Amino acid sequence: SQQGEEDPQALSIQEGENATMNCSYKTSINNLQWYRQNSGRGLVHLILIRSNEREKHSGRLRVTLDTSKKSSSLLITASRAADTASYFCATAASGYSTLTFGKGTMLLVSP
Amino acid sequence: EPEVTQTPSHQVTQMGQEVILRCVPISNHLYFYWYRQILGQKVEFLVSFYNNEISEKSEIFDDQFSVERPDGSNFTLKIRSTKLEDSAMYFCASSEASRPGNEKLFFGSGTQLSVL
């Protein structure tokens, strides 16, 4: 399976701090995506980084991709209580269509 | 902003009963998906659907499961004879890409299925 595995499983920080989550995967990919899930809700797409990209920014989000290490990181800067959610990476393997998800990192941002 | 809608939000059923979960994908999207998430676990792929037929399916999607697009807007997941282990949150998703996996998915809010 080429699914991503996030690390850490849980992260607890204070508002204003940065949060970094990591994702590792096993096989070559077309792209890697990050999603957010608020408790009991559907997943919301945050950012997509293609296999030929190394870094991407979107607002307070910064994603890096290292295809040689088969890993990605999601950085949320200046975190807010509203960022409290689970964050999932998802990968689509080269030549296949299925987007598969990791187990997620549960982020708690305390005011 | 257009969104994927799912009904019902909660479904309680007895083991062995049939259930149909309904979804209305975003209107100009081409690919449709069902995923499920057992409480506290990862989001698991069930099936993808394109051009009125199944594109891919996982090992979870056995003969008890079926999908259908009965008209131009609805996309349904049927479980013929539910088991206790089918209890999960079921998510419908859609994407506009003609090559799934290359673009983002739009998810509905899910149907929480409880099999008693």
Image (spheres, helix red, strand yellow):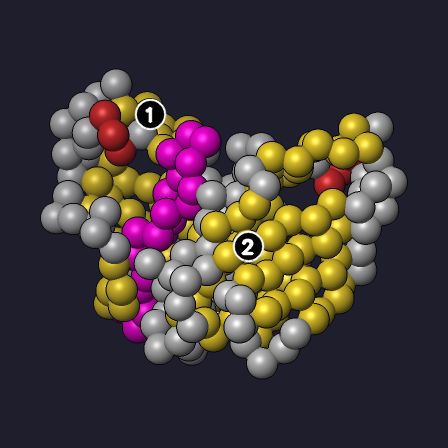
Amino acid type, residue under disc 1 in the picture = Ser
Instruction: Identify which residue is drawn at 28% across, 40% down.
Output: B20
User: In the image, A80: left or right of B31?
Assistant: right
Give how far across and how far down residue B103 sits, in percent: 52, 70
Residue behind mark 2 = A23
Instruction: Identify which residue is drawn at 73% across, 61% down.
Output: A62
Q: Vertically, is A2 above or below A66?
A: above
What chain does badge 2 belong to?
Answer: A
Q: How crowded is mark 2: few (under 14 residues within 10 Å), some or many (20 or more)?
A: many
Give how far across and how far down residue A6 sits, in percent: 53, 48
Residue behind mark 1 = B114
Q: What stretch is highlighted in magenta?
A: B34-52
What chain does badge 1 belong to?
Answer: B
User: What is the spatial separation of the Cα atoms under label 1 and label 2, in whole angstroms?
Assistant: 31 Å
Q: In which quarter of the image is residue A75?
A: bottom right
User: In the image, A31: left or right of B112?
Assistant: right
The C terminus of chain B, quarter of image: top left
The reply to whether callout 1 and callout 2 are in contact (CB within 8 Å) is: no
Amino acid type, residue under disc 2 in the picture = Cys
- Is residue B68 something that shows in the picture? no
From the viewer's side, name the closer residue of A90 and B82: A90
User: In the image, B102: left or right of B19?
Assistant: right
**B41 part of magenta stretch:** yes
Give how far across and how far down residue B25 sits, in percent: 45, 57
Give how far across and how far down residue A110 sits, in percent: 79, 28
Q: Vertically, is B8 above or below A28?
A: above
From the viewer's side, name the closer residue of A3 and B64: A3
